[in-house]
Amino acid sequence: MSSTHAQPEPSLGTKGPHEPLRGRRIMVVEDEMLIAMLIEETLVEQGCTVVGPFNTVADALDAARSAEVAVAVLDVNLHGQRVYPVAEALEARGIPFVLLSGYGTDAIPAEHPDWVACAKPFMPNDLIHALSSRLA
């Protein structure tokens, strides 16, 4: 089950909205509720519309194949399953993404050295920067 959340006037908890993110639809794939809430709050403060969050590979894969999004945030490990099929589906559609992982760049598969990862735990501004750079 997916949802879409937007807030017209950001209540900025981070340094002002980054222009590459303002008004963008961003897919969130995360199975830990508190982290998903932090990501959602961070993105809404940046003027984004959140698509998701999705907490299973199956639901995320369905969304990756059809959702209208500018960029995605993907937790590498969803209930013990790797999110790589979701990343590949987004890549096939030309949609950039950032992987989230406690393993940092070690979470990037050898066959995809161009994929981008943001280490967990992360600061909200690190995530904002990583997403903004994917849209630049």
Image (cartoon, helix red, strand yellow):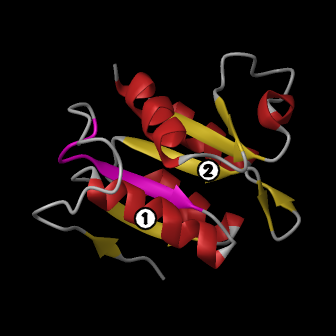
Three-letter code for the amino acid on which mark 2 is drawn = Leu
Measured as percent of width and height from the top left, residue 61 is found at 60, 59
In the image shown, does 90 or 15 lie closer to the viewer? 15
Three-letter code for the amino acid on which mark 1 is drawn = Glu
Residue that numbered label 2 is attached to: 74
Left or right: where 77 falls relative to 40: right
Q: Residue furthest bottom?
A: 1
Chain-order first, disc 2 or disc 1: 1
Residue that numbered label 1 is attached to: 40
Quadrant assignment for the C terminus: top left
Residue 114 highlighted magenta (yes or no): no
Placement of 101 over or under 113, stated as above or below: below
Give residue 16's mark.
none
Placement of 124 over or under 97, stated as above or below: below
Placement of 135 over or under 122, stated as above or below: above
What's drawn in magenta, residue-wise?
21-29
In the image shown, does 60 or 9 lie closer to the viewer? 9
Measured as percent of width and height from the top left, residue 119 is found at 72, 39
Q: Residue furthest left?
A: 8
